[in-house]
Image: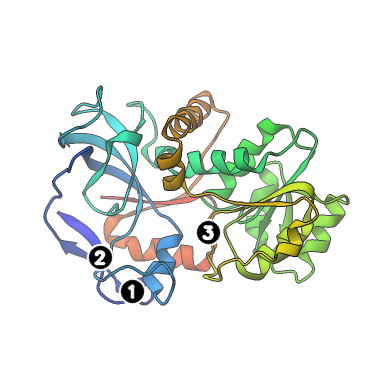
């Protein structure tokens, strides 16, 4: 089968299609024939190299795969069957087939859009868990960084159900800021050195939560915006600058928590299943509308990474085999 690999670190041009063997599903896994594959920004960081998240070469790309189950590995959960249409998180996703964990499959209706459905496996449940971890109160205020991106635009929509007074999304280009406004949130330009002051204008008493996957200075500035009993939620560091939390910053009854989807699934599998089901339900009822920026053939995966590097996409970028 065809699968995307990179044999050296660098720009999008290092991505290539290799011929590799179709994987055999291991214990607790199923094999999916891919219809659509959603890209993750973290893979641009790994592709460039020189980060805490580097993996051995040749490298593969993670992602969320939608397709039909074609084979079962041993010890798969009851009710999982060949022919089912599902979405799943895959470590080696950008390929014609993917072996995935059968414990967290999202059921996808036959008539559902495959590109939209890629967000049901991981990014949707992650956005939901970020907000649950943030404890956003009714009438409160929340800042969502990268609010035009794959996870951020879902978090903006999901935040409405907590009935906050103010939802603030950040981005770094005019068209992304306009997109955030179209989702019903206030928009703040993260390239403005005084962006925290802009947030304070919208939330003079501070904010109850910040969702951050940027890290570095932006994390520190966000922590300074949180009012007493508020929560800083970290779920990555796309800048590769891992956040450092000074103890003194917490003495005002602020909390800092980290969220990772795999850690949550391992620690609270029943709750993680409930998150997945809730996100799929909201999608099917129309309360959650994933946005697909563009779809490219698998052979043009470099174009997807060029767009991710430019941080210009609105919603998700998808590949089709």
Residue at 37% x, 70% y is: 54
| Residue denoted by label 2 | 5
* Residues marked 3 and 1 touching at CB (< 8 Å): no
Of tags 3 and 1, the one toward the viewer is: 3
* Residues marked 3 and 2 touching at CB (< 8 Å): no
Residue at 24% x, 53% y is: 95
Q: Is residue 77 visible?
A: yes
Relative height, residue 164 to residue 174 (above, below): above
Relative height, residue 49 to residue 148 (above, below): below
Residue 236: assigned label: 3
The Cα–Cα distance between marks 3 and 2, rounded to whole angstroms, is 23 Å
Of tags 1 and 2, the one toward the viewer is: 2
Residue at 48% x, 49% y is: 260
Q: Position of residue 86 (x, y in %)?
A: 31, 33
Q: Secondary structure at mark 1?
A: helix
Q: Position of residue 49 (x, y in %)?
A: 39, 75
| Residue denoted by label 1 | 13
Q: Is residue 166 visible?
A: no
Residue 131 in which image quadrant: top right
Q: Position of residue 78 (x, y in %)?
A: 24, 23
The residue lying toward the viewer, choosing from 25 and 158, is 25
Residue at 57% x, 58% y is: 213
The Cα–Cα distance between marks 3 and 1, rounded to whole angstroms, is 25 Å
Q: Secondary structure at mark 2?
A: strand
Which residue is most to the left? 21
């Amino acid at each position: 089968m065809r699968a995307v690999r990179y044999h050296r670190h660098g720009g999008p041009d290092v991505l290539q299609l290799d011929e590799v063997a179709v994987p055999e599903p291991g214990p607790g896994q199923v094999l999916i024939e891919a219809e659509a594959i959603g890209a993750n920004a973290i893979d641009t960081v790994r592709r460039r190299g020189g980060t805490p998240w580097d993996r051995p070469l040749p490298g593969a790309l993670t992602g969320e795969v939608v397709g039909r189950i074609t084979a079962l590995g041993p010890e798969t959960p009851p009710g999982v069957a060949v022919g089912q249409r599902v979405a799943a998180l895959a470590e080696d996703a950008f390929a014609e087939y993917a072996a995935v964990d059968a414990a967290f499959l999202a059921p996808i209706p036959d008539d559902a859009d495959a590109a939209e459905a890629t967000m049901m496996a991981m990014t949707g449940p992650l956005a939901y868990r970020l907000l649950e971890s943030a404890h956003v109160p009714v009438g409160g205020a929340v800042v969502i960084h990268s609010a035009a991106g794959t996870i951020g635009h879902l978090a903006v929509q999901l935040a409405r159900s907590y009935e906050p007074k103010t939802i603030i999304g950040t981005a770094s280009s005019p068209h992304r800021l306009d997109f955030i406004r179209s989702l019903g949130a206030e928009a703040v330009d993260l390239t403005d050195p005084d962006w925290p002051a802009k947030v304070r204008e919208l939330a003079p008493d501070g904010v109850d939560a910040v969702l951050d996957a940027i890290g570095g200075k932006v994390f520190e500035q966000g922590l300074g915006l949180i009012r007493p009993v508020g929560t800083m939620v970290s779920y990555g560091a796309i800048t590769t600058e891992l956040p450092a939390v000074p103890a003194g910053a917490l003495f005002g009854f602020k909390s800092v928590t980290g969220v990772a989807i795999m850690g949550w699934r391992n620690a609270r599998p029943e709750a993680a299943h409930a998150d997945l089901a809730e996100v799929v339900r909201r999608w099917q009822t129309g309360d959650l509308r994933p946005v697909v920026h563009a779809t490219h053939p698998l052979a043009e995966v470099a174009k997807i990474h060029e767009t991710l590097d430019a941080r210009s996409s609105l919603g998700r970028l998808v590949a089709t085999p």
